Image (tube, rainbow, N blue to C red):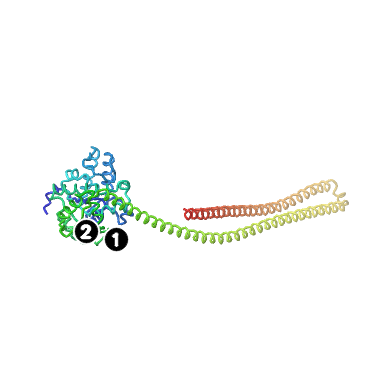
Amino acid sequence: MDRDHTHGYPPALVIGGMHRSGTSLTASILAAAGVQLGDSLMAPAASNPNGHFEDLEFYHLHKRILAANGLCMDGFTCQETIDLPASARVEATELVQRRRATNCPWGWKDPRTILFLNFWASLIPEARWLFVVRSPEEVIDSLFRRGDTAFSVNPRHAVDVWVAYARRIFEFVQQHPERAAVVDVTRVVADPASILRLASDLLGMELATPEPTYEPGLLQIGQPSHRSSFVRAVRPEAHDLYETLLGLAGRDTTMLPTRRPTRMIDVAEAGIAEWATACRSRAELALLAARESEARHSLERVCSDLEAERVARVALDHQSSGLGAEHARLQAELANAGRRQAESDHEWMQRMEAARTERDAVVADLHAALDEAWSLAASADSERDNLARALEAQKAERHVELEAQVELEAQRELEAQRDDLRTELEVERNHVALLEVERDGLVAQLEAERVIHESLRMDMTGRIEAAVAGTGRDILG
């Protein structure tokens, strides 16, 4: 296909259709084939476990426009004219420019796009459109089963919304046949490769062929015939539009089953209401089953957590026993250190007493020597008489010198002994101080370990009690 229609921009493909028509499945196929559908996509949900593939920027823009018009933000409206605020037009233009700047095939998927087809078509002339259609009964049943609140009070509104979306699609394809294509959801399921060929023709480029993504059971095909009669009764044009769209999709409508009209609108609306009620009941039962399963899993997790807590508590008990033994060992070491200090003090006192005794003995010896000297001096009286004054002077001088010398030697010896004793005393005091520091450190360590152990015990007790209390509430709830 000629690329002149792109106006120099990368090709763009918009996937549209009524809600619950299979647009998410189609978008997943095209995204896997290489079409960039956005960097920030809506997260999976219970209704679409494999993902919605909706660009959140387009999604929120559409919702804000609907809210500004006082309409349902989910897009469940039949209003034909919807005003676009100037700010929304500016935001849309900037959004498109950012997507074009990627310079790769891009697009988006959001069912609300059907409400703004002409706006987007004029803003993005290079865009191509792929519309997915699904029978009104299947769409309505899916909406009822999903539990959309817009249809809780007026279930018939689901039929009206389907008709409004289908009419918009039909009119757009009639106006832009060269830019749009219609595909039946059953074809998407049965032959995804043909959808890729159709998209490649629309974009004028070859797309990759990904692995199949459809999971049986996620998309229910077919509905009881009486539901078709209900739809035809309240909106006779619904199936005419559906068959017309199937014809645009290339499907042979002559093979479709003949639907018998039900002319009693009240009966049909009552049937649709009962249909919605039955779907909601099934959805509620499924939700209850899911909640029961979740509660069961939660209980299993709580039991597992309790078992883990029990194992941890046993480990803490073992650790506590080890800490108790370590505490006893440290207490014993502290007691031994105290005993060693007491013994050291006693030994120091004994050595001091021995030093005093030795000093007294030295002094006594000195006095004895002095007495002996005096005796010698007395015995030398005769010689002293001969020497007269000289001997007397010599004796006096010698006596003073001897006494000074004796006193000096005794003093030196006592000072040396005193210094030795002081040195030994200082060493002992340093040793005692080191023992006191070691004892204080051991006491502080024991106290810190006791505080940590007590904190762990209280925290673990609190967590076990909270878990047990939470389990009780879950079971009672």
Residue 73 point in image, percent of width and height: 29, 44
Q: For the N terminus, which image quadrant?
A: bottom left
- In this view, the mark in front (2 or 1): 1
Q: Which mark is residue 188?
A: 2
- Residue 225 percent coordinates (x, y): 24, 57
- Is 313 left or right of 245, judged from the image as shown? right
Q: Amino acid at mark 2?
A: Val
* Label 1 sits on residue: 217
The Cα atoms of the two marked residues, 2 and 1, are separated by 15 Å
Q: How many marks?
A: 2
Residue 130 shows in this picture: no
Q: State the SS at label 2.
A: helix
Is residue 431 found left or right of 176 in the rendered image?
right
Q: Is residue 402 visible?
A: yes
Judge by depth and name the residue closer to the eye, 28 or 215. Answer: 215
Q: Position of residue 281 (x, y in %)?
A: 35, 54
Using residue 59 as the reference point, say whether residue 118 is left or right of it. Answer: left
- Which circle's residue, 2 or 1, is located before the other in the chain? 2
Q: Which mark is residue 141?
A: none
**Residue at far top of view:** 86
Question: Who is closer to the viewer here, 126 or 470?
Answer: 470
Q: Is 151 positioned to the left or the right of 321 in the image?
A: left
Would you call the spot at circle 2 few (<14 residues within 10 Å), some (14-19), or many (20 or more)?
A: many
Front position in the image: 334 or 353: 334
Secondary element type, mark 1: loop
- The residue under label 1 is which amino acid type? Gly
Give neighbour class at mark 1: few <14, some 14-19, many 20+ (Cα, 10 Å). few
Query: What x and y, as percent, mark residue 216?
Result: 28, 62
Q: Nearer the viewer, residue 105 or 154?
A: 154
The answer to whether the residue labelled 2 contacts the one labelled 1, judged by CB atoms less than 8 Å apart, is no
Residue lying at the far front of the rendered structure:
264
Quarter occupied by residue 70: top left
